[in-house]
Image (cartoon, helix red, strand yellow):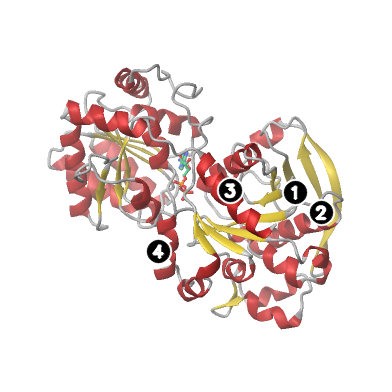
Amino acid sequence: MKALHISAECYPAAKAGGLGDVVGALPKYLSRAGMPAGVVIPRYQLSWIQQHSFHTIYKGVVRLHNQYVPFTIQQESSNALDFPFFVADIPGKFDRPGIYADPGGYSYGDDVERYLCFQQAVLQWIVNSPGRPQLLHCHDHHTGLIPFMVKHCPEYQALRNIPTVFTIHNGVYQGAFSWNNLYLMPAFDAGARGLLDWNNAINPMATAIKCAWRVTTVSPNYLKELEQQSNGLELLLQHEQHKCTGILNGIDAQVWDPEADPFIAARLNGKLDAFKIANKQALAKHFKLDPKLPWITFIGRLVGEKGADLLPGLVSRALHNGLQAAFAVLGAGDPGLQDALRQLSYRFPGRFDAALEYNEGLAHQLYAGSDFIFMPSRVEPCGLNQLYAMRYGTIPIVRAVGGLADTVPDIGEPNDQGRGIRFTHFDLDDANLALYRAVQCYHNPEVLAEVRERIAALDFSWEKAAAEYIDIYDQMI
Ligand code: ADP
């Protein structure tokens, strides 16, 4: 194992969003390209982890102020993920039924302690392991203090020359906490205190940007956007520009394969049109929508970042004005928004339906059976939904931000390379116009077939992104 990925999520063991997808796929493709990589995440009380067998490879104790927290590092025994997969079992901290929140949607209140324990458990294990990885790749703020700890905590001095890469999957969540929690930190060189600080708080994401050898974002455009707007990190990112690279995520072509996907009702057998119709009909058993209409689907966390708050106003306006389309939503999040969406399904039976849950299988079925995927995001670091959708011949309707701008040229552009429908402003008028354009496109069979064929043939596989990461690793190792 040359590279060790340290993360809060890894599909299929633990996934809440795109972070899980990336960390579950990238190491596989790195290993295939000659850069053996493994992953370590916390041990949650989640079904995949409970259904697989793990053996303990390290036992230790983390000190958290005056508390001693025992932990074990365990390795999955059957190599089910095609790469070495480890969990840090820290009783009392992560043995819970959710990753970030309990199943009722309430966030756990002890993230500072939890992630400090996790990061130190991993470092202690690495320091004491004979076959150390040559590089640490940390993902998002949950692991953002690691590049600092290896350089400035005497306990991990043996790792001070180990290269660290930090990937920003989502700059909105920075993990900042008050200096009042300083007593929870492991001992560090007093002179390094400034590296922890950003806006009078300890900010793990800012610290990682300062201390990691290299920083990556999950799309080139997102890096540019972060330099202009990133909740207070703009100047820091501009200053550290020389070590930052935007690398567009890939998709795991094995997991998202319309010809072999075990979740969907009908597999692709050459004929895209028949594939779409069969899956839409099967889906109509779950979503009470008219299959003769174009289906416009939203999948994602019901939060402001994803623009989910636009949905109730937009859908009621469009349907009220007679738009001939049906809307499906799969998502969980803001309870107020969930209520608003529930009400829409009562108001517009047959035209709007929502599954207000997290359901991996249903997401696959929706990518296969929908005609359009709707992504009115305010912020979109990369966006994987549009990539999955395109692979299944589903046309994206996107607001042109972040990775959406990188991956979805408009079908109205003159070079005939369009992949979807774009709109610019985050408002009802612009989004509404995009919906009308989608319905128009649906009723033009020639254009519809051509765009579907084009997007389903695109190659967003991880090989290209893995090669870019390897390039960065090679410069450091
Ligand atoms: P983010 O990580 O910001 O949530 P991404 O587009 O990078 O957004 O990744 C979202 C991933 O989570 C996709 O794999 C998407 O299919 C999945 N997803 C989001 N919400 C749900 C849900 N309610 N049920 C199933 N899968 C979901």
Mark 1 C-beta to ligand 1 under 8 Å: no
Badges 1 and 4: C-beta atoms under 8 Å apart? no
Mark 1: secondary structure: strand
What residue would you read off at disc 1? 88
Asked whether residue 100 appears in the rendered view, the answer is no
Instruction: Give me the C-alpha separation between circle 4 and circle 3.
Output: 32 Å
* Residue nearest the viewer, comparing 463 with 55: 463
- The amino acid marked with disc number 2 is Trp
Mark positioned earlier in the residue sequence (2 or 4)? 2
Disc 1 vs disc 4: which is toward the camera? 4
Q: Residue furthest bottom?
A: 191
**Residue linked to disc 4:** 225
The CA span between labels 3 and 1 is 19 Å
Q: Which residue is mark 2?
A: 125
- Disc 1 + disc 2, Cβ < 8 Å: yes
Amino acid on which the number 4 mark rests in the picture: Glu
Asked if 164 appears above or below 75 in the picture, the reply is: below
For numbered disc 2, what is the local secondary structure? helix
**Is there CB contact under 8 Å for labels 4 and 3?**
no
The crowding category of the residue bearing disc 2, from other C-alpha atoms within 10 Å (few below 14, some 14 to 19, many at least 20), is some
**Nearest to N terminus: mark 1 or mark 4:** 1
Q: Residue 313 at x, y = what percent?
A: 24, 50
Give the Cα separation between the discs numbered 1 and 2: 10 Å
The residue singled out by tag 3 in the image is 102
SS type, badge 3: loop
